[in-house]
Amino acid sequence: MNHKIILLVEDNPDDVKLALHAFKKCNIANQVVVVGDGVEALDYLFGTGAHAGRDTSVQPSLVLLDLKLPKLDGKEVLRRMRADPRTKLQPVVILTSSKEEQDVTRCYDLGANSYIRKPIDFDQFIEAVRQLGLYWLLLNEPPPEGKESCQPR
């Protein structure tokens, strides 16, 4: 499980601390890469900008994406990920405080794999992280690397 990277795209330092604490409490020892805005998320994924030269053959097994981000919002990050063959099948879980129905719908339209509202209660957040780790890092079977989607041509 340790070889699977989690990309946490979150601009709120308190939410970052909470997430990292929750991963530790749930014994999720995966490497967590934290980026604070949408532009840096795309730079990390595509090896550009601040992350130029990064080995992009090593991609996160899971992207936890907030919606309300500086520079480029989470929906636009998701749209660009799904538009690029290198990241179009990458698991993306929206982890946000937004309760807007249109955000939920738009994220699924853009190809989100899951949409989770951040629980206010710490114990609920710990449980959400535990379940995220169990499903996305242990149970989920990702698509084979370098393969196109299974959509008919």
Image (cartoon, rainbow, N blue to C red):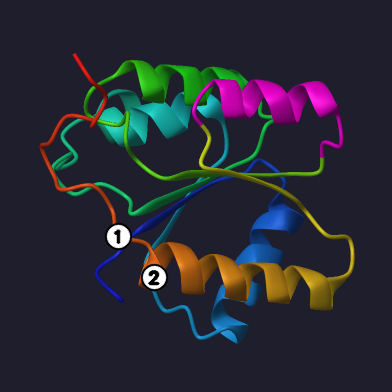
Residue sitting at 70 percent across and 52 percent down? 13
Give residue 81's position: percent from left, percent from top: 39, 25
The answer to whether mark 2 and mark 1 are in CB contact below 8 A is yes
Viewer-proximal residue among 145 and 19: 145
Give residue 69's position: percent from left, percent from top: 66, 29
SS at circle 2:
helix
Number of residue marks: 2
Mark 2, Cα crowd under 10 Å, few <14 / some 14-19 / many 20+, is few
Give residue 42's position: percent from left, percent from top: 39, 27
Distance from disc 2 to disc 1, alpha carbons, whole Å, reads: 6 Å
Is residue 76 at least partly visible in the picture?
A: yes
In which quadrant is the C terminus drawn?
top left
Magenta stretch: dominant secondary structure: helix
Residue that badge 1 annotates: 141
Q: Which residues are magenta?
A: 98-111
Viewer-proximal residue among 84 and 39: 84
Query: Which image quadrant for residue 23?
Result: bottom right
Residue that badge 2 annotates: 139
Q: In the rendered view, does 37 fall on the left or right side of 98?
A: left
Q: Is 110 part of what is drawn in magenta?
A: yes
Q: Amino acid at mark 1?
A: Glu
Q: In the rendered view, does 75 fall on the left or right side of 60?
A: right
Query: Which image quadrant for residue 57?
Result: top left
Give residue 62's position: percent from left, percent from top: 41, 52
Residue sitting at 71 percent across and 75 percent down? 126
Query: Which image quadrant for residue 86?
Result: top left
SS at circle 1:
loop
Q: Is 135 part of what is drawn in magenta?
A: no
Viewer-proximal residue among 80 and 107: 107
Mark 1, Cα crowd under 10 Å, few <14 / some 14-19 / many 20+, is few
